């Protein structure tokens, strides 16, 4: 059985921040931080850029800066060949995707494609973690994942997957 590695979309981190207050859900945030530090929950560079450039992301920016300062954590670097995969994604969804240079969505999916294609040593399955929902003829992360056969789950499924309970 493959081990799981999750690639976070910004909307999942926002949901965690807005609904699972760090002051109250300390256990969950400890688990999330531990997964980030162990490379089991990835925040790729374009998502990190969205976080640090967003005016409403003060908590997330500070939280990740603290992780960087205290543990040496850094965002997951983009693998070689990712630009070609992003271009393929954009081509498939031409006219349906609103893409800006620092838009992270196609990079999240491209990262999962490359990692799932290339991980024969560590036996990981890379799963996209997003709050977006599949929409017929849409161009959201779930649509991209479906098109390229990449697994994706939402926050509730993630919490179940990692075995989180509040007790």
Image (spheres, rainbow, N blue to C red):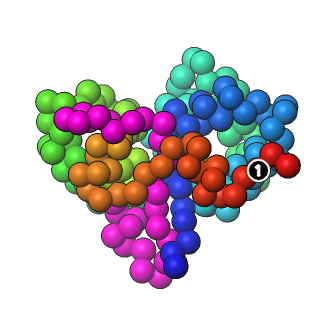
The residue lying furthest to the top in this view is: 55
Q: In this figure, which residue is indicated by the disc labeled 1?
A: 165
Q: Is residue 151 magenta?
A: no
The x, y position of residue 100, in whole percent, is: 30, 28
Q: State the residue at coordinates (33%, 39%).
A: 134
Category of crowding for the residue at label 1, using alpha-carbon neighbours closer than 10 angstroms: few (below 14), some (14–19), many (at least 20):
few
Residue placed at 65% from the left, 35% from the top?
Answer: 16
* SS class, disc 1: loop
In x, y percent, where is residue 165? 76, 50
Left or right: residue 119 compared with residue 93: right
Residue nearer the viewer, 69 or 139:
139
Highlighted range, magenta: 113-140
38 or 52: nearer the viewer: 38
As for residue 139 lying within the magenta part, the answer is: yes
Residue 38 lies left or right of residue 124; in this view the side is right
Residue at 60% across, 57% down: 161
């Amino acid at each position: 059985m493959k081990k799981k590695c999750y690639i976070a979309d910004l909307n999942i981190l926002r949901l965690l921040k807005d609904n699972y207050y760090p002051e109250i859900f300390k256990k969950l945030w400890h688990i999330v931080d531990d997964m980030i530090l162990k490379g089991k929950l990835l925040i790729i560079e374009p998502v990190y850029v969205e976080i640090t450039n967003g005016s409403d992301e003060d908590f997330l920016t500070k939280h990740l800066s603290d992780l960087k300062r205290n543990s040496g954590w850094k965002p997951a670097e983009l693998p070689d060949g990712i630009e070609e995969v992003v271009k393929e994604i954009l081509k498939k969804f031409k006219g349906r995707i609103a893409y800006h240079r620092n838009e992270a969505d196609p990079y999240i999916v491209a990262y999962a494609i490359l990692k799932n294609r290339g991980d024969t040593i560590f036996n990981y399955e890379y799963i996209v973690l997003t709050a977006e929902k599949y929409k017929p003829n849409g161009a959201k992360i779930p649509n991209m994942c479906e098109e390229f056969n990449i697994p994706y789950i939402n926050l509730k499924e993630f919490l179940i997957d990692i075995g989180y309970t509040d007790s």
